[in-house]
Amino acid sequence: IFCMVGLRPWGGEVWDSGEAEVQSGAGSGTGCQWHLPRLSTGTSSGLVLVFDIPSKGTNITLSEVLQEHRDSITDIASEDGAADLVTADDSGALCVWRSKDEFSLLTKISAFGWTCSSVKLWNGVIAAGYGNGQIRLYEATSGALRATVSAHARWIYALDVAPLTGKLLSGAEDSYVQIWKLSRSPDTGDIEIEHCYSECVTDTQLCGARFCDPEGNSFAATGYDLSEIVRYGQV
Amino acid sequence: MSARTLPLLFLNLGGEMLYILDQRLRAQSIPGEKARKVMNDIITTMFNKKFMEELFKPQELYSKKALRTVYDRLAHASIMRLNQASMDKLYDLMTMAFKYQVLLCPRPKDILLVTFNHLDAIKDFIRDSPNILNQVDETFRQLIDMYSCLSAGEFQLIRQTLLIFFQDMHIRVSIFLKDKVQNSNGRFVLPISGPVPWGTEVPGLIRMFNCNGDEVKRVEFTNGGNYISPQREGSFDLYGDRVLKLGTNMYSVSRPVETHMSGASKSLASHTKENAAPNPLAKEELNFLARLMGGLEIKKPNGSEPGFRLNLFTTDEEEEHAALTRPEELSYKVINIQATQDQQQNEELARIMGEFEVTDQPRQSTSKGDDLLAMMDEL
């Protein structure tokens, strides 16, 4: 039995960890991703556990253990495509996985000295947020660095992607939420990112932020010592 | 949560306590000899080898109540006495100051620089006593050994553990309100200008690369803040310029420190619940306290050195008034223990809980060291 942090709902179903018995003996998990019919969760030892979710019933079983990271897992992202899963760790290293029947390592992205606190996958683009306030974009299939953004003055805690538009949101301890737009140039295939909007949640070190709709027209954020979730919408 | 947090919590809170005591000793015009004796006694007790050994063991943080008990004992390690109201105020100031420092740390690793600032100041307090100085240096070296090679992620976990410990504490401190680092609602001001942390770039630049790794585009944007590059990194050695000001002494005789109780109660709903519910960790906390305090060798005042009472307020009347008007939910009551099945144990506990006071004569205990609770009784 382990502790799951950061559950994400998929297709209207919400995973309630109290309902099912999980057969595993791993340490505390950080980072969890639902990609039916499987669920993967990271651990503080660096292992990524992949579970099979049955279509009926509550008997979840451990199907694979991905052993590549040597530091605590911080976040996991998934998408259907050539690259299916990205895992990030405390040292700042990222692993990109492809899954057919089993997961295989596609590529590994080295750390550069700062924790990768948050990672998202969209359209074959990896967006990673780091503890030094930087956002980096990578090509998922090759792991090549495609953009660096000096986005925040403090530790980035949250990244989110609006899948229908490619809008990216970053929230950090500098009290800012920044909204960006990801795109791919049709001619060159180059990945591009532009800055759209800044919002300061006064005197709040943000620890969570997400879009509230798949187009990215509204978002919500919360932070340390705050008992509220603040919601913003486009007018 | 990180099991390496307690040493940092204890040393930094201890440092703040010493700053405040030093200021009050001078404000109350306590003779130099006595003041120095008090500071030396407390620092000697704090850095006691056995105590430090217990402290540095990997362990969870315990409740505010348990920790408060340790500082109660520390503050009474010499010829100085503090009334309940003054002790409450002292603890409020210590915790809010350190909460502020943890919150505003530019990098998670800077929490170590804050600790070193406190230790540097402590060494200055006892610069004329080489024996105690050695003890402090020894602890300094232990800190460097244990923390220097931790990653940013591990430091952030320590920082988060500390922030959770301080969560929902919004006591307003007048020196913070005056300096505009705290709002009237008790929350700290987070600056959006100034130097960025060491290792962070000033926000505002996007660089894009092609598949060969060549930079093909560079775009600037406004991030909203007003940041500049940092000048230099602080030193993590035994001696050196820490650069960071957090953790240095912000008190002086001319700036008396007050806290405001009113208006803080609204945000303490969760705190109230914690006080009312029976504490299931009570026994564990007692064991922890017993272990820690087993290492605290408290010197009892001998006949030739008369004690004195320190007041954290400007007058005795103020102190009395503060004691009467302190909101219920902010009282640092010692651990509440439900009736246990063991009637005898419960009586023992109840007696100990009610008697955390300095007595003139040390109480005699029959089984020295055997029974943890009896060990507490001795102190």
Image (spheres, grey):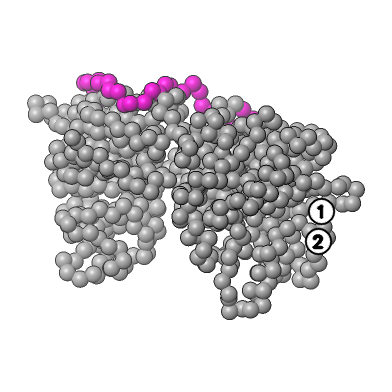
User: Does residue B45 appear in this view?
Assistant: no
Q: Which mark is residue B362?
A: 2
Q: Position of residue B328 (x, y in %)?
A: 56, 56
* The quadrant where residue B314 appears: top right
Tell me which amino acid carries mark 1: Lys
Q: Nearer the viewer, residue A205 or A148?
A: A205
Chain for numbered disc 1: B
Residue B108 located within the stretch drawn in magenta: no
Q: Residues within 10 Å of mark 2 (few under 14, many from 20)?
A: few
Please, what secondary structure does the residue beneath circle 2 have?
Answer: loop
Q: Which residues are magenta?
A: B211-240
In the rendered image, which residue does mark 1 sit on?
A: B300
Q: Nearer the viewer, residue B79 or A174?
A: B79
Main secondary structure along the magenta-highlighted residues:
loop
- Who's the residue at 50% across and 23% down the image? B232
- Who's the residue at 27% across and 20% down the image? B220
Residue B215 located within the stretch drawn in magenta: yes
